[in-house]
Amino acid sequence: MLQEKENNQPGTLFDIVVRFVSINAENIQSLIGFPEDVGKKIFDQFIHLNEYAVYPSDHQVKILSCFEEAYKEIILESMALSDNLIVFNEYFDSFLILFQFISELCMCFCYLGDSHEFFEHLQNISLLKKLCLKGNCLKDTVIRKITLPIRMFNKGPKNVEYLDLSENMFTDDIIAGLSVFQKLQCLDLSGSNLSSKGIRNLERNCSLKLSSSETESFIHPVGTKGWAIPLIEKWCDVCRLRRKNRDIKKQNLYYSKKRFLMAKKSISESSSTIQFSPIKLVFIRQTLIEEKVNDKFAYPNVSKSLPEKVTVSYQKAIEEDIFAQYI
């Protein structure tokens, strides 16, 4: 009885107000000036109580904009969104708001391709220091698209220090574009189709040195940090549940089974054709080499080991990703 009475006691006026504001967060005009502790409580309550937190909408974008304007990088400092193309596309506008003050971003194996709208919005992420785009079916044109705002207006991700572009279809044509990243400390182009001449030009234009270390990685993994972690986890759960419900409806359908077998066959064929270059191409600024290791980095004889062409079936890689997330 005593415990029931304690549970039925009304909350404090502060808790009641926070709950009310969170439920009606779409009416918030500004949170500038509110202490971080108060903002954190409102944000947490918004995630758990407000339906706009779960489903993508204009209200969701507006609410997140209010929090970002007031608390900036505290909302989302770094983000690891590898292999989550469905979630990224579903909540694209909301992610763009969350990315405004982000410093580290990992989008590995999302199969974005050169034409994805994301690259047009990179110019608004000026605080970015670490960017990982490994395995995204990218070509040389995307580097020109990313660096155009930097070259023309001196805005965009010009402060990038660690850049992972490995396992994409880059050639020597990207060297001119990469030279705009003047603060670049480490660049990973493993699996790209660079010639030995291109490597020498890249070293000269970007003031980097090809590392001969096969074991140590200078681009450390990116983790997700910030208030928005529970919110992003909810988004992932929504997409996962939607896919699960779709599977239940399709599992007894003839064409669904046929599609499953076709996708499985496509994956088995693609696994035998996807071959990235075995050559590890990690470029490091000389000062970073001196800080990280004591042994000398010798320049390898790349002219004998670099392949002329790297054959990659990117279309089938995309099919595999779609199969894994939709079927």
Image: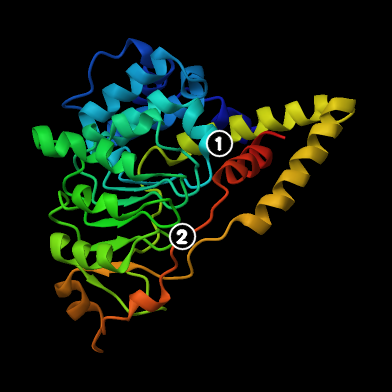
Residue at the outermost top position: 27
Q: How far apart are marks 2 and 1 (CA)?
A: 38 Å
Q: Quadrant of residue 219?
A: bottom left
Q: Is residue 276 above or below residue 260?
A: below
Amino acid on which the number 2 mark rests in the picture: Lys
Foreground label between 2 and 1: 2
The front one of 144 and 69 is: 144
Q: Marks 1 and 2: in contact by CB < 8 Å? A: no
Residue under the image location 40 percent in, 20 percent down: 22
The front one of 203 and 111 is: 203
Q: Circle 2 — which element?
A: loop
- Please name the residue that numbered disc 2 is placed on: 309
Residue under the image location 24 percent in, 78 percent down: 292
Amino acid on which the number 1 mark rests in the picture: Cys
Q: In this view, does 24 lie above or below 248?
A: above
Question: Can residue 326 be seen from the camera position used here?
Answer: yes
Image position of 131 (left or right of 1)? left
- Please name the residue that numbered disc 1 is placed on: 236
